[in-house]
Image: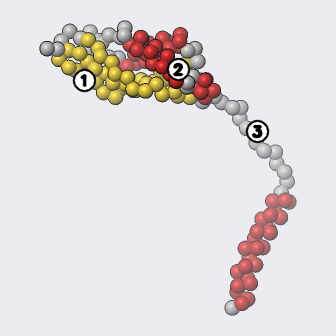
Amino acid sequence: MQRRYKIALAVPALCLVAGIGAGSVTPDTPAPEAPAETLEPAILELGAFTFHIEQPHHTTYVVTRMSAVFADGAAAELHATPETVVRLRNAVFDAVLDVRPSAITGDVDLDALSERLGRTLTNEVPDIVSIDVNLLGSQDVPRR
């Protein structure tokens, strides 16, 4: 019985020693070169926005969540200050004032809105790559 305990302890110890020894005997291979650092886009949340769009027989309220996409994390961190976020939000409101619904369907084209906001905000902050606009909801309220 005591012999089994010794074998049970000796086998893992031998495997450990063999593993360490095998690591020191294997030839050194050069480590693969790390790929050049690629810049991943960084997203700065601008928050939720509610816009009202006046139409002939009703008012449409559109609720969106927007975020600015920067080329890299450093640019996003640079513009993540509260003052810059407020400036970007104000620029969003200024750009949306000129958006009109489609004459045929009465809907707001989110792709056109995103493109327009991207152009406007790129003039404000050149580091912005694009603007993501996610529709959270819309509601038509008839006029009285």
Total marks in image: 3
Marks 3 and 1 close (CB-CB < 8 Å): no
Is 83 on the left-hand or right-hand side of 94?
Answer: right
Depicted 98 relative to depicted 45: above or below = above
Snapshot quadrant of residue 51: top left
Within-10-Å neighbours for mark 2: few <14, some 14–19, many 20+ = few
As drawn, which residue projects farthest toward the left?
Answer: 144
Element marked by disc 1: strand
* Residue designated by label 1: 139
Marks 2 and 3 close (CB-CB < 8 Å): no
Residue 100 x/y as whole percent: 32, 10
Amino acid type, mark 1: Gln
Q: Is residue 72 visible?
A: no
Element marked by disc 2: helix
* Residue designated by label 2: 83
Q: Which of marks 2 and 3 is in front?
A: 2
* Residue designated by label 3: 33
Amino acid type, mark 3: Glu
Q: Sequence order check: which comes first, mark 2 or mark 3? A: 3
Residue 97 x/y as whole percent: 36, 10
Distance from disc 3 to disc 1, alpha carbons, whole Å, reads 55 Å
Residue at 29% over, 16% down: 52
Within-10-Å neighbours for mark 1: few <14, some 14–19, many 20+ = few
Is 136 on the left-hand or right-hand side of 142?
Answer: right
